Image (tube, rainbow, N blue to C red):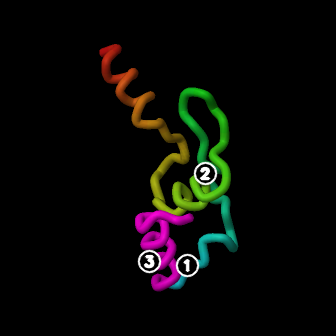
């Protein structure tokens, strides 16, 4: 079951002429977790690739809070 956030993002991409499942990779590599280095899979990979960030390294909210608390 898709959440409205996921559904809306996919619709936005399709309306912009982007078919997100045609090319699930970028020149930056596949999205992966910055700390564990594990690649994201499934819908997470699809959505993270669609964000057009300079780097494909991401943190979970809990990981970000842990990093911030350390400083």
CA distance for labels 1 and 3: 9 Å
In the picture of the structure, the residue carrying the numbered disc 2 is: 28
- In the picture of the structure, the residue carrying the numbered disc 1 is 18
Q: Which of 53 and 70 lies nearest the eye of the viewer?
A: 70
The furthest residue to the front: 1
Q: Residues within 10 Å of mark 2 (few under 14, many from 20)?
A: few
What percent of the width, then of the height, locates residue 17?
53, 84
Depth check: give the residue in front, 9 or 52. Answer: 9
Q: Which residues are magenta?
A: 1-16
Residue for point 44% across, 28% down: 63
Q: Which residue occupies 51% across, 73% down? A: 10
Estimate the spatial distance between the alpha carbons at disc 1 and disc 2, rounded to whole Å. Answer: 18 Å
| Position of residue 47 measured from the top left corner of the image (x, y, whole percent) | 53, 60
Asked where in the image residue 64 lies, by quadrant, the reply is: top left
Name the magenta segment's main secondary structure.
Answer: helix
Q: Which callout, 2 or 3, points at the residue further toward the start of the chain?
A: 3
Quadrant into which the N terminus falls: bottom right
Residue 39, numbered label: none
Q: Which residue is mark 3?
A: 12
């Amino acid at each position: 079951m898709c959440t409205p956030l996921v559904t809306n993002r996919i619709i936005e991409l399709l309306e912009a002429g982007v078919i997100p499942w045609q090319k699930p990779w970028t020149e930056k590599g596949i999205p992966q977790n910055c700390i564990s280095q594990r690649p994201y899979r499934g819908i997470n990979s699809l959505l993270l690739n669609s964000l057009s960030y300079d780097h494909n390294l991401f943190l979970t909210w809990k990981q970000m809070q842990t990093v911030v608390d350390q400083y």
